[in-house]
Amino acid sequence: MTTTPSTTAPLADAPVLALAQAIHGVLRHVLARHGVTFRQQVVLRAAVTADAPQTPDEILTRIRRSLRVDPADIRATVGELLAKQLLTEDGAHLLPTDAGRELLAAVGAETAPIAAHILASTPAEDLAAAGRVLALVTERADAQPAGLTA
């Protein structure tokens, strides 16, 4: 009698989804080598990827749900990025500096091959399914009352 290995995957429940944080740890490690925090990177990326210059409140609105932190913490992070000269003020708007853009490029250059290695043998259909599940979980989490997500 021949047996075949089980191909039953674990359900994407809370503990399994929490393991995705391990990949997030790789990013945090790279960011730490560059002297920035994850939150600083998220705020800086929001400024860099915006279609037009953003006010601090526009950046706050754009990233508040993804960071799930108090607006005061995001404002403090903006202050940190200004102090590090990764963002600059232009009237009411925040603009990324050349140093800020270079930092994000360097972090991307370091993390891209690591992410590629981690995901290398994962079939495209599995990645697509994971993307759909994570998008749905995020959408549902975003729909929770503010008191539960803060």
Image (tube, helix red, strand yellow):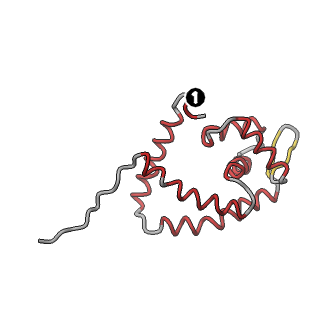
Relative side of 66 to 138, left or right:
right
Relative side of 70 to 55, left or right:
left
Relative side of 20 to 104, left or right:
left
Residue that protrudes farthest toward the left in the picture: 1
The quarter holding residue 98 reads bottom right
Q: Is residue 121 above or below residue 150?
A: below
The residue identified by callout 1 is 147
Relative side of 63 to 115, left or right:
right
Residue that protrudes farthest toward the front in the picture: 15
Image quarter hosting the N terminus: bottom left
Residue 14 location (% of width, % of height): 43, 45
Name which residue lies at 79% across and 51% down.
Answer: 96
Name which residue lies at 60% across and 42% down.
Answer: 66
Disc 1 is placed on an element classified as helix
Q: Is residue 76 above or below residue 106?
A: above
Name which residue lies at 15% across and 71% down.
Answer: 2
